[in-house]
Amino acid sequence: MKYTSIDSALFFENRKRFNEKLKPSSMVIIHSNDEFPRSGDQAFPFHQNPDMFWLSGIDQEESILILFPDCPIPAYKEVLFLKKTNEHIAVWEGHKYTKEEATAASGIHTVCWLEEFKTMLPMLMHHCENVYLNTNENDRYVHINQYRDLRFAKDLKEQYPLHHYQRAATIFRSLRAVKSGYEVELLQMACDITEKAFRRVLKFVKPGVTEYEIEAEIIHEFIKNRASGHAYNPIIASGKNACVLHYNDNNQVCKDGEVILFDFGAEYANYNADLSRSIPVNGKFTARQKAVYNAVLKVMTEAKKMLVEGTILDEYHKEVGLIMQSELIELGLLDKHAVAKQDPNMPLYKKYFMHGTSHFLGLDVHDIGNRYEKMKAGMIFTCEPGIYIPEEGLGIRLENDILITTKGNIDLMQNIPITAEEIESLMNE
């Protein structure tokens, strides 16, 4: 890992909060993510299961965590099972956790090698009534692939059909959505690294550079500042490419007179930033570009005011849509008479603003949380309105990451330049 060590108190507190949600006589079993093959002898870079990391701080493949607060054997109330290293692994793959290092990272004192799991599991199952198993219940996820937690759940239920099985995902959804102070610090670090990359880009962009050259500048700054890399595939979309919401080709030349839409963020210690900005290739917006830009910024400013305790995400999206509708009429993109006659279930503004304004943010870029419950202090949301006009070859999106507190909200990206005037000034220094 490139990031500096994290205080294990974070994970101790997370386990404490999680255990408080369990039924009596319950055991929790969480697996690390799979390693996925890329080719004949290569795997894709490993990325830890966010739930495993949130509970343990362990950032290594082939790991298992057991939580059993009511276990009659005190040493087995918390157990980590790790891949045992050897000389061959050390030479070909590098260092793996020692038991002492795993304890220091997680705060868990009982650490066993993975081969002990099969012999210890039957004994622990004998003493519990409920078993909490973990599955991916992110509401953006469509189940296609089998994964380690899911395969294990199927096998365990066949071997022990009479236990009571519970969903760990519902607990994670309620707890992970509310960030602790330490988590906010890690997210702020991801945002700060993202800021450095954006400021670097402002000095680099000019007519004739390619989207991939800009991408290279970003990853340079990320790695230089201990980020693991990109939080998601970066979008570097110049001109008409900005009207493709998930444009990832990043292979075109940026031309004089165009606007580039950026959507990128650093991943630091598995926590993710998510930034969008739109800048003129030549350092100067046209009057039309600036009018659209300022309309998006106005919607963002008004939307941020609504990201407070008590707001419900789905209702918020509808309110933001009405603000956007007014701006689109002002820009001449919508006719107010047509809007008055529109089907409320198919609002006309969606032609130019077809995505939501905010989503949960944390260990996942689109983090887990309940969009039908009221927002709470400690939650972090993106705020990302946009206007996309294919017929003009123009797309503008602005996005910051917003922390909700009991006293309002805090913009974790408040120091990143955002007004059209700031952007132009920095590009022309």
Image: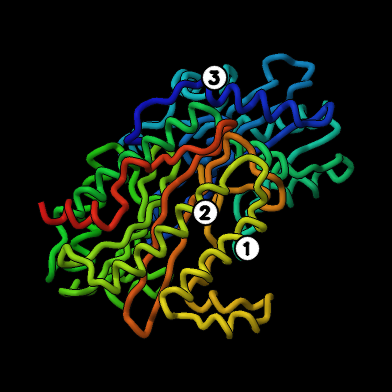
Q: Position of residue 74 (x, y in %)?
A: 72, 14
**Mark 3 Cα-neighbour bin, 10 Å: few <14, some 14–19, many ≥20:** many
| Mark 3 vs 1, N-terminal side | 3
Q: Position of residue 182 (x, y in %)?
A: 48, 27
Report the front residue among 190 and 151: 190
- Left or right placement of residue 305 versus residue 72 in this view: left
What SS does tag 2 mark? helix
Q: Which residue is mark 1?
A: 318
What SS does tag 3 mark? loop
Q: Tell me the distance, in whole angstroms, between the alpha carbons under discs 1 and 2.
A: 11 Å
Q: Which residue is mark 2?
A: 303
Residue at (71%, 39%) from the top-left corner?
171
What SS does tag 1 mark? helix
- The answer, for residue 63, to whether it is visible in the render is no
The type of residue carrying mark 1 is Lys
Q: Tell me the distance, in whole angstroms, between the alpha carbons under discs 3 and 2.
A: 40 Å
Q: Position of residue 201 (x, y in %)?
A: 20, 54
Which-is-in-front pick, marks 3 and 1? Answer: 1
Residue at (43%, 25%) from the top-left corner?
6
| Mark 3 vs 2, N-terminal side | 3
Q: Which residue is mark 3?
A: 107
| Mark 1 vs 2, N-terminal side | 2
Quarter of the figure with residue 37 = bottom left
Tag 3 near tag 2, CB within 8 Å: no
The type of residue carrying mark 2 is Ala
Tag 1 near tag 2, CB within 8 Å: no
Quarter of the figure with residue 411 = top left
